Image (cartoon, helix red, strand yellow):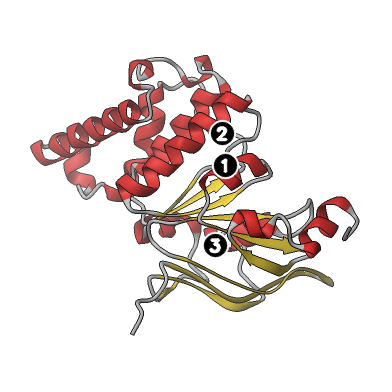
Amino acid sequence: MTSAALLSVQAVSLAFGGVRALSSVDMDVDSGTICGLVGPNGAGKTSLFNCICGYYTPTSGRIKLSGRDITNTPPYRLAGHGVARTFQHPVLQPAKTVLDNVLVGGHSTFNTGLLSSTFRLPRARREERALEDRGRELLGYLGIGDLAALKASELSYGGQKRVELARALMSRPSLLLLDELASGLTHEEVMELGEDVQRVRTDFDVGIVLVEHHMGMVSAITDKVVVLVQGAKVVEGPAAEVQGHPVVIEAYLGTAA
């Protein structure tokens, strides 16, 4: 018997009024793998991503994490189930330090009660120190440990993307959702960040779903690619095979030739 996939999207459909955004989409992602979710504009990538993240509730179908149904789970509870995400445009508190922004991601792992936190009892102080140590460790792991005391607004765009990645890892996720990681970055930054994502996949044994338009990054780091066109999955497989599929060529270029 094979073990259940880390993430299992089962016949998920989504409609807004009379507009169908997703049509019976299936997708599985295993631990320690990177799955690229690609397609032309309006293909339904963001809609599916938001269903997985809990921002949208599918019209039909189920979403499971390690066999557990998380279909109707709100985003703030998903962190406790091992789901973390980044955003296409970094969502940081610009006036706060880099470290403070990263520590926000650890809230779901904080076990100290309200009373202990309010009165700064020893247990609360120990847990706060442990979280801060982990935050500094993650910043160092991603090559920006020396920037911990800077304000987030002082970072380059690429630096902000790394802060978001560190913040997502603070919750010790089993599933990491990365939204347009390459957006706004130079070619060199894209390749460097892609290498970081591959290290994260291996070192933290997480399953990763990458919504991405940068096909160079997709080809370089994914184990498989799922292609959506007009809300439906049209093909799935290794990036090299998928890019040459006639339906994919037609969807991107307007011709099957």
Return the residue nearer the eye: 249 or 122.
249
Residue type pointed to by label 1: Phe
Q: Real-space Cα distance between discs 2 and 1?
A: 6 Å
Task: Out of 123 and 234, give the one closest to the viewer.
Answer: 234
Res. 215 in view: yes
Q: Which type of secondary structure does the marked residue at label 1 adopt?
A: loop
Q: Mark 1 points at which residue?
A: 87
Q: Count residues near mark 3 (Cα–Cα under 10 Å), then give few for <14, some for 14-19, many for 20+.
A: many
On screen, residue 22 versus residue 130, left or right, reads: right
Distance of mark 2 from mark 3, alpha carbons?
A: 19 Å
Q: Is residue 230 above or below residue 167?
A: below
Residue at point 69% right, 69% down?
233
Q: What mark, if any, has residue 52 been given in the picture?
A: 3
Mark before the other along the chain sequence, 1 or 3: 3
Give yes or no for contact between labels 2 and 3 (Cβ–Cβ under 8 Å): no
Is residue 239 left or right of 124 when viewed as pictured?
right
Image quadrant containing the N terminus: bottom left
- Amino acid type of the residue tagged 3 in the rendering: Ile
Q: Is mark 3 on a helix, strand or loop?
A: helix
Query: Residue drawn 50% across and 56% down?
Result: 223
Image vertical order of residue 76 relative to residue 132, above or below: below
Quadrant where the C terminus sits is bottom right
Quadrant assignment, res 54: bottom right
Q: How crowded is mark 1: few (under 14 residues within 10 Å), some or many (20 or more)?
A: some
Q: Which amino acid does label 2 sit on?
A: Pro
- Residue drawn at (18%, 36%), measured in percent from left and top? 130
Residue 90: assigned label: 2
Residue 161 against residue 232 in the figure, above or below = above
At a point 34% along the width and 16% down the height, the residue shown is: 146
Mark 2, Cα crowd under 10 Å, few <14 / some 14-19 / many 20+, is some
Callout 2 touching callout 1 (CB < 8 Å): yes
